[in-house]
Image: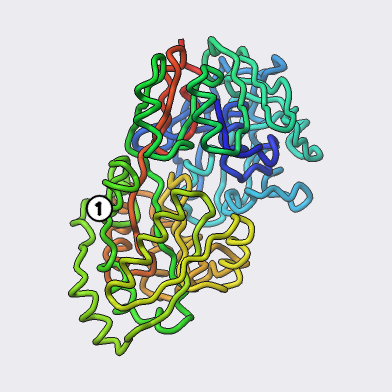
Amino acid sequence: MLVANDPETLDPRYATDSVGLRATRLVHAGLVRLDPDTLAPVPYVARALTWLDPLTLRVDLREDVRFHSGAPVRARDVVATLRAFASPAVASRHARVVEAIADAREEGDRTVLVHLSRPHATLLTDLELPILRADEAASPPDPAGGLDGLGPYSVLSFTRGEVRLAPADGGALPRPAHALTLRTVHDENARALRLEAGRADVSLNLVSPPLLPALAAQPGLAVTARPGSNLTYVVIEEERAPLGDARVRRALSLAIDRATLCASLLGGRARPASGLIAPAHWARVEAPPLAFDPAAARELLAQAGTRQAHLTLLASTERLRGDVARVIAQELGDVGVGVEVVPLELGTMIARLNAGDFDLAVLQLPEMTEPNVLRWFLHGSSVPPAGANRGRVQDPLLDALLDLGEVARDTGQRREIYARVEAREREEMHWLPLWYEDQVAVTSERARAFAPSAEGRWLSFASIP
């Protein structure tokens, strides 16, 4: 499989980049995993999960799952893992995921009782965290991926440009039929040439739409796509005039022709967004498409007293993202908002976003698996460095809804709460939702069965015959 960057680490306690996160989920397994279509949590290393009361979850473990070393998974491994992720000494980058857990204790070898400090609706999704062996859970960082795992693969080697994974026995999934190599190729044209030459079997979301027809025409290659759940959007820094005015933000939204952008630059492999949550997601409530109406945009700008505003729009240096940003800038210019596109490397862009040194930026929300992630990006308490509310949104009604979504456990109730979140967002336009991009895979003949999940993970490698 081709990837665009080397993983930062293969230690699941610290992996946060997309390649590292997805690679570690091949090597390790959690109590739950996410349904590849709806992204709802389903048992994985756990056999059953039962709520005893609003603050207590009983976890019963499978008896047929073993670590790669052959050691059976026990309740003590789960308890040690949850404590390690929460420990300041370990300093896991995922510590916030377990912050609502007050305690976890063993009830025999195969049962764990998890006690919450407060109602927390997302616990089941949070328990996707990889389970580590008890004696390794709090060990020093292991970036080479040597920690014992429960996933379908083990790490053979990790060198610059290459991660080699071997099929593993006894894990939470049956032993895969094939070994897997992750090959880092930074340049898009080089990736396309490797696929054409038969030197790669899979590329996921790494070839831009204009190149896909040529690859699909090559003997032995196929291009397949499925609807994705990852939202592309424009974040707005609301502390910078005139962007604190909701009329201006709604005008910017009305100026963007999402349908044409999806059909042209994205080659029809994206769906215009009507909100924040993708259509297939369990929390989604149907809503009308976001309108494209330049005349209404000009009228709103006039009402707000904004004429000939000049803004900056940050964008990735990737060619497709730059093209998207330039078209959006042109469309905003057509309604009287001058926009300068500023292409930046990812690290520089993140630094400017966190510092509030921007007006607008085109971003993608990766792995929209649980709608509670919106709290991290939109709640008033999550302004950097406390979170990723880079637009400095301060909306008490939205905060109250996001707080309710974090504690309500009933799925129907949570769906209603997030419908109200979506309605509030359509009024205020703190973000400008653009589209949900498809998960687009280019595959060789022998990897034809590869099918990514809605958020783009790779677990289906384990089931390729």
Q: Vertically, is 127 above or below 150?
A: below
SS at circle 1: helix
Q: Nearer the viewer, residue 35 or 408?
A: 35
Q: Nearer the viewer, residue 138 or 78?
A: 138
- What amino acid type should be assigned to the residue bearing mark 1? Thr
Q: Nearer the viewer, residue 158 or 389?
A: 158
**Residue visible at 20% across and 81% down?**
299
Q: Residue furthest right?
A: 140
Residue 360 position within the rendered picture, expressed as x and y whole percent measured from the top left? 45, 69
Residue 464 position within the rendered picture, expressed as x and y whole percent measured from the top left? 46, 14
Snapshot colouring: rainbow
Q: Vertically, is 195 above or below 20?
A: above
Q: Vertically, is 273 above or below 445?
A: below
**Residue visible at 59% across and 37% down?**
19
Q: Which residue is mark 1?
A: 260
Residue 27 position within the rendered picture, expressed as x and y whole percent measured from the top left? 62, 26
231 horizontally vs 391: left or right:
left
Residue 458 position within the rendered picture, expressed as x and y whole percent measured from the top left? 50, 29
Q: Residue furthest bottom?
A: 305
196 horizontally vs 181: left or right:
left
Bin the neighbour count of mark 1 within 10 Å (Cα to Cα): few under 14, some 14-19, many 20 and up: few
